[in-house]
Amino acid sequence: MRRKAAIIGGGVIGGGWAARFLLNGWDVVLCDPDPDAARKAGAVLDNARRSLPALYDRALPEEGTLAFRDDIAAAVSGADWVQESVPERLDLKHAVLARITAHAGSQAIIGSSTSGFRPAQLNANGARAVVAHPFNPVYLLPLVELAGDPALCTRAADILRGIGMYPLTLRREIDAHIADRLLEAVWRESLWLVRDGIATTAEIDDAIRMGFGLRWAQMGLFETYRIAGGEAGMRHFLAQFGPALEWPWTRLTDVPDYDDALVDLIAGQSDAQSGHLDIRALERLRDDNLVAILRALKANDHGAGQVLRAHEARLPQPETAAEPITLQIQVPASWTDSNGHMNESRYLEAGSAATDRFMALIGADAAYIAGGKSYFAVETHIRHLAETHEGTRIHARTRLLGHEGPRLHLFHRLLRQDGTLLATVETLLLHVDLTSRKTCPPAPALLAALADMARAQAGLPAPEGVGRAVGDKPAAS
């Protein structure tokens, strides 16, 4: 029997909670007086269905059922988890939590999405809620800050881990919890920077997303600063930069006493957190994560990824000789598997990138595709001939094997810098009208470019391995 979650308040946060539970196999009842609540929740759920399963290499549980109720009592009946996500007004939360507490089962966890109120404030009139503060989008970001009765928080944490979230239980109640207090400090300073004409909103966002935001995304604050201390670690960093707290760098001038006790406390906790890794290992971990994040941003042409794309476009293009170089890449750590060598899926990715470059060479570039025509791959054959490891520089050389009508037949050789043949990728593509999704003849300019390429390659011998099928024995030498 599936478990049930009741979501009280169907805005951005409530809709995100509904999606998180639904896609993890829970039945969900959503209660919101907004007559448009079903449409809004449906839009959030559509985004969640598109993105959350893409994080996993295993199937999520079968999706639960979603129902809507106008009455809180009906919504919370039989629920294992009730999440209050109404606007951040204490009087409204008191009224809603009173009704939830009166009608929810005694074993139900009652969580509040409050960004700032403490459990003592929420429960001042007899409610039994715990703070369960998530971050938008709730269906993707794992953090949930928990505060309140320890036994309830322990039970809540187990449930949250079961739906793929990361519960962080506060050591004691405090206004705005942990994360929002940090965000509030950055927010306040940003408001001053805008007000004083120091920076625009766009410039402040760029300062975050082009710099420290990328580090924070995978190492947080203290581990980032530990690396900044070099081989001497956190204590050295504190000695170097701690006195800056007394300088008038920010408008937030109420700082703790920077004494030996605070230094010892922070340095000790940092050692416990990261002391099992030497500085070089931490740097490599940081760099591998940053490469993966930045490559993802480049693929989406967003944020720091736009900078990468623009820089890459300015780099010298590889030669366009008879057998043009269509790929040049250093194998990133994210392309390797548990055996330490390049995963077979990445050979296909490399071949795909070589195909894209070849298409651009003949004129089937982004502008051509925007005009409604492109090539679609219909068959690919890969041979793995030598191991490829992280850090290896590889390149591809591409042969045009045929271009009859809508057909385009390519053969990529993936090579190391020393000429070692690592793999071959043979692919057949069809020219397609993107509106009808049916094959059609290429544009005359493409046909002319293909003819020129075919003439340039006419004197080259046929590459070894063309037409091979899986399991064919190598040709006799």
Image (cartoon, grey):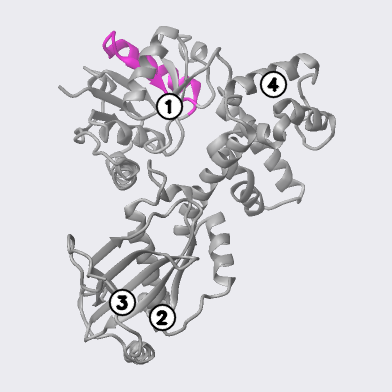
Task: Reply above or below: 128 against 381.
Answer: above
Residue at the spot of label 4? 267
In space, the residues marked 2 and 4 are separated at their CA atoms by 57 Å
Mark 4, other Cα within 10 Å: few <14 / some 14–19 / many ≥20: many
In space, the residues marked 1 and 4 are separated at their CA atoms by 25 Å
Q: Nearer the viewer, mark 1 or mark 4?
A: 4
In space, the residues marked 3 and 4 are separated at their CA atoms by 60 Å
Please say if the residues under marks 1 and 3 sit with CB atoms less than 8 Å apart: no
Residue at the spot of label 3? 463
Q: Nearer the viewer, mark 1 or mark 2?
A: 2
**Closer to the camera in the image, 410 or 199:** 410
Mark 3, other Cα within 10 Å: few <14 / some 14–19 / many ≥20: few
Viewport quadrant of the N terminus:
top left
Q: Earlier in the sequence, mark 1 or mark 4?
A: 1
In space, the residues marked 1 and 3 are separated at their CA atoms by 52 Å
Residue at the spot of label 2? 323
* Residue 212 locus on image (x, y percent): 63, 43
Q: Residue at x 62, y 54 (%)?
A: 202
What residue span does the magenta drawing correspond to? 88-114
Query: Which amino acid type is shown beneath numbered disc 1?
Result: Tyr
Q: Nearer the viewer, mark 1 or mark 3?
A: 3
